[in-house]
């Protein structure tokens, strides 16, 4: 199954039908809520009500987690249909239509923090002629840096397709002035593995300087990003070539029988390697 960002741009992919399906799936709501709660945990917010920016807020699922935590929020998304669902659900935050790649402008130092769930990977694709992913990421991080107060954190959960995407995203964040790094939860699980880019806009006295640890103690997992990706590719290659020559012969003969093509019966000599003739 292809990734959503390979099928259509986000404003087209999340049409009215997809938005309703996305917002009504109990499984999807549970996953999004848990990731939003984890992002808030990694934000290390001060013990008071804060104003947060929800990037790619969609139907407001992550925003509800912010509300439940006792904070206020403003969110934006590129899909009108997803924002329509958020309005119908009467979310507590203010939402508006905007493209993260163009970076909406806010008054400097407006937000005490920012979160984003499953949105950042969309900026790694060229949806229109002339678009350059790295330039869009730079614009996004530049505007985000200005919007955060000094020392505030942004926690951006995303699904990277390749190690190169991780490097491009982190490079764009660093050039914008952010510090921080990547936190990977459950790095050895194919389904539960989650990437969180945890960055901070400078340092202030009330903000911790350390990057929180990933779940299961994999705090330095981001340093092995390239190696992990290479191992995953090797595993995939092994999976593709796991069939033996004999298995392939039997499979081909069975396929021909189903098509009505006459083939010889299987014997102990089927697919056996023959001795070379001189």
Image (spheres, rainbow, N blue to C red):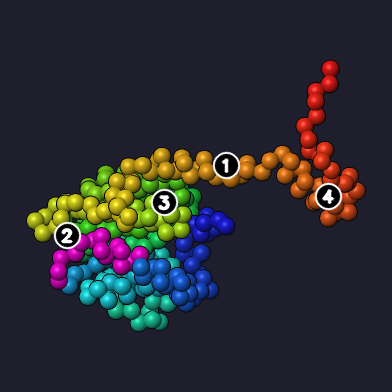
Identify which residue, 204 or 234, lies in the foreground.
234
Question: CA separation, marks 4 and 1?
Answer: 27 Å
Mark 3 or 4: the one toward you: 3
Disc 2/disc 1 C-alpha distance (Å):
49 Å
Query: Which residue sits at x=45%, y=70%?
Result: 28
Residue 195 visible in rendering: no
Q: Nearer the viewer, residue 150 or 22?
A: 22
Mark closer to the chain start, 3 or 4:
3
Query: Which stretch appears magenta?
Result: 35-48
- Which residue is identified by label 3? 188
Instruction: Please identify, in this view, whether the residue under mark 2 or under mark 1 is nearer the observer.
Output: 1
Residue at x 22%, y 75% (from the top left corner): 70
Q: Which is more N-terminal, label 3 or label 2?
A: 2
Tell whether position 210 is magenta.
no
Tell me whether the residue at label 2 lies in contact with that at label 1, contact meaning CB atoms closer than 8 angstroms. Answer: no
Depth order, front residue of 224/28: 224
Marks 3 & 1, CB-CB < 8 Å contact: no
User: Is residue 3 shown to the viewer in this render?
Assistant: yes
| Residue bearing the label numbered 1 | 238
The tag on residue 149 is 2
Residue neighbourhood size for the residue with mark 2, other residues' Cα within 10 Å, grouped as few (<14), some (14–19), many (≥20): some
Mark 2 → mark 4, Cα distance in angstroms: 68 Å
| Callout 2: SS | strand
Q: Where residue 66 sits: x, y (%)?
A: 28, 72
Marks 2 and 1, the one that precedes in the sequence: 2
Badge number at residue 17 = none
> Badge 4 is on which residue?
256
Q: Mark 4 packing: few (<14 Cα in 10 Å), some, or many (20+)?
A: few
**Mark positioned earlier in the residue sequence (4 or 1):** 1
Q: Nearer the viewer, mark 2 or mark 4?
A: 4
Kindly report the distance in space between the C-alpha atoms of the residues bearing marks 2 and 3.
35 Å
Secondary structure under the numbered disc 3 in the rendered image? loop
């Amino acid at each position: 199954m292809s990734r959503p960002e390979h099928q259509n741009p986000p404003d087209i992919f999340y049409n009215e039908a997809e938005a309703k399906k996305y917002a009504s799936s109990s499984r999807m709501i549970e996953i999004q809520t848990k990731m939003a709660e984890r992002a808030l945990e990694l934000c290390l917010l001060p013990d008071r009500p804060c104003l947060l920016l929800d990037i790619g807020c969609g139907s407001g699922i992550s925003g509800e987690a912010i509300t439940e935590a006792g904070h206020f929020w403003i969110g934006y998304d590129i899909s009108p249909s997803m924002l329509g669902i958020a309005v119908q659900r009467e979310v507590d935050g203010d939402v508006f239509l905007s493209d993260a790649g163009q970076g909406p402008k806010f008054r400097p130092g407006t937000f005490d923090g920012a979160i984003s769930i499953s949105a950042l990977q969309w900026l790694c694709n060229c949806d229109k002629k002339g678009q350059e992913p790295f330039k869009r990421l730079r614009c996004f991080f530049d505007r985000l840096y200005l919007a955060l107060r000094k020392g505030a954190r942004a926690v951006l959960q995303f699904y990277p397709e390749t190690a190169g995407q991780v490097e491009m995203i982190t490079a764009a964040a660093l050039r914008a002035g952010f510090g921080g790094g990547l936190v990977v939860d459950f790095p050895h699980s194919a389904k539960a593995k989650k990437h969180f880019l945890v960055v901070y806009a400078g340092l202030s006295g009330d903000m911790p300087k350390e990057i929180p640890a990933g779940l299961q103690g994999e705090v330095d997992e981001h340093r092995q990003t390239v190696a992990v990706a290479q191992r995953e590719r090797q595993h995939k290659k092994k999976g593709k070539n796991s069939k033996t020559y004999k298995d392939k012969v039997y499979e081909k003969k069975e396929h021909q029988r189903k098509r009505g093509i006459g083939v010889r019966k299987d014997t102990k000599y089927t697919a056996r390697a023959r001795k070379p003739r001189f």
